[in-house]
């Protein structure tokens, strides 16, 4: 071996060792708490996003998802990301009404009842949400909807009056208010604790998608699902701003690209699964059908009340978002 070649080899070895150490020093692991079960499409989508980022950064940033509220419960995830206890996480937007009324736009009955309208509402509300989230110290990476929300009950329900006194599982302030307006008795329960709540009689009814009913095998506890198509709430994936700012440009670019792919994939998946979930509820013995006229009319009235109350809380900013949504 000539000397020149030997020197080149030596330099190469030094370069490899050098690279190795700098990778090791820079490599970072982000734990990503999720509230819903690992087999739910939101969680599967997040796991794919985590893998895409990990692969595309060559492991420099490894994201690891933790489903079912195992790292932080649903109700704790936003605070965990905001305070940096978790660098990244997923949370149901409409459950953050105590942070700012703007987030409740996502669960206003009958404002947006199809995937197309839900997308428009997302586009219309995103600038206002981004602004609020920035002040809280987080950044929205992507959001994905749940299928339309319907009413689960343990007995036939023909009008809101039939809901009187029923124990109602709520997942945010809006669903608690809706229960109250029907005369039902709301209790807030995260999806991860749903089966337990229905099994022990703490809950007898709820509003949710076919997706969550399917995940929790709800047919073991209730028999009816009324496809009220009331709204399509979204989950969002957020990142702590300090963790975000500490990344280099290339990594941030990769995350944005993979987040966009996750958002597109998630919307597609949600709409393609909506009917499949309904079929599964029926296959497992549930009576699945549209709400009757009286129930629909009562729901519409309740929706109007909730919209009025929300506009009082959300003020001009809320009205502005509604206006731009309606123009779309
Ligand atoms: N499932 C979630 C929120 C909306 C939905 O469809 C839940 O029931 O907790």
Image (cartoon, helix red, strand yellow):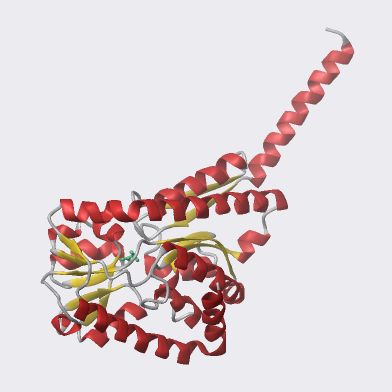
Q: Quadrant of ligand 1?
A: bottom left
In the picture as drawn, the residue positioned furthest to the bottom comes out as: 312
Let me know if residue 267 appears in the view: yes
Q: Which residue does the image show at 50% across and 87% down from the upper left?
A: 314
- Residue 94 in picture, x, y percent from top left: 42, 73
Q: Quadrant of residue 187?
A: bottom left
- Residue 222 in picture, x, y percent from top left: 14, 64
Q: Is residue 169 left or right of residue 326?
A: left
Tally of numbered tags: 0
- Residue 277 in picture, x, y percent from top left: 27, 54
Q: Which of the pair 274/46 is nearer the observer?
A: 274
Q: Which of the pair 1/87 is nearer the observer?
A: 87
- Residue 9 in picture, x, y percent from top left: 79, 19
Let me know if residue 77 appears in the view: no
Q: Which residue does the image show at 13% across and 63% down from the upper left?
A: 223
**Quadrant of the rendering where the C terminus is positioned:** bottom right
**Quadrant of the rendering where the N terminus is positioned:** top right
Q: Is residue 267 left or right of residue 179?
A: right
In the rendered image, the vertical position of residue 196 relative to residue 128, given as above or below: above
Q: Which residue does the image show at 70% across and 52% down from the upper left?
A: 248
In the picture as drawn, the residue positioned furthest to the right comes out as: 4
């Amino acid at each position: 071996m000539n000397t020149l070649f030997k020197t080149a080899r030596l330099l190469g070895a030094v370069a490899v060792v050098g690279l190795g150490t700098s990778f090791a020093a820079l490599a970072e692991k982000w734990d990503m708490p999720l509230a819903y079960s690992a087999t739910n499409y939101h969680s599967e989508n997040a796991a794919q996003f985590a893998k895409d980022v990990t692969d595309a950064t060559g492991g420099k940033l490894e994201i690891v998802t933790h489903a079912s509220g195992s790292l932080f419960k649903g109700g704790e995830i936003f605070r965990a990301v905001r305070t940096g206890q978790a660098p990244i996480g997923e949370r149901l937007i409409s459950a953050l009404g105590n942070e700012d009324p703007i987030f409740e736009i996502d669960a206003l009955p009958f404002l947006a009842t199809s995937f197309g309208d839900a997308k428009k509402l997302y586009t219309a509300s995103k600038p206002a949400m981004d602004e609020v989230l920035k002040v809280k110290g987080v950044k929205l990476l992507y959001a994905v909807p749940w299928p339309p929300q319907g009413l689960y009950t343990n007995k036939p329900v023909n009008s809101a009056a039939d809901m009187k006194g029923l124990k109602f599982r709520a997942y945010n302030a809006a669903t608690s208010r809706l229960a109250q307006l029907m005369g039902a008795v709301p209790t807030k329960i995260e999806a991860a604790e749903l089966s337990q709540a229905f099994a022990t009689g703490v809950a007898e009814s709820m509003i949710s998608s076919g997706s969550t009913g399917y995940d929790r095998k709800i047919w073991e506890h209730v028999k009816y699902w009324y496809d009220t198509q009331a709204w399509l709430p979204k989950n969002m994936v957020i990142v702590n701003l300090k963790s975000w700012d500490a990344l280099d440009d290339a990594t941030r670019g990769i995350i944005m690209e993979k987040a966009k792919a996750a958002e597109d994939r998630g919307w597609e998946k949600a709409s393609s699964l909506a009917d499949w979930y309904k079929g599964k509820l029926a296959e497992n013995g549930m009576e699945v059908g549209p709400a009757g006229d009286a129930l629909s009319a009562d729901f519409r009235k309740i929706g109007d009340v909730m919209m009025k109350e929300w506009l009082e809380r959300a003020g001009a900013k809320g009205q502005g978002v509604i206006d731009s949504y309606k123009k779309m």
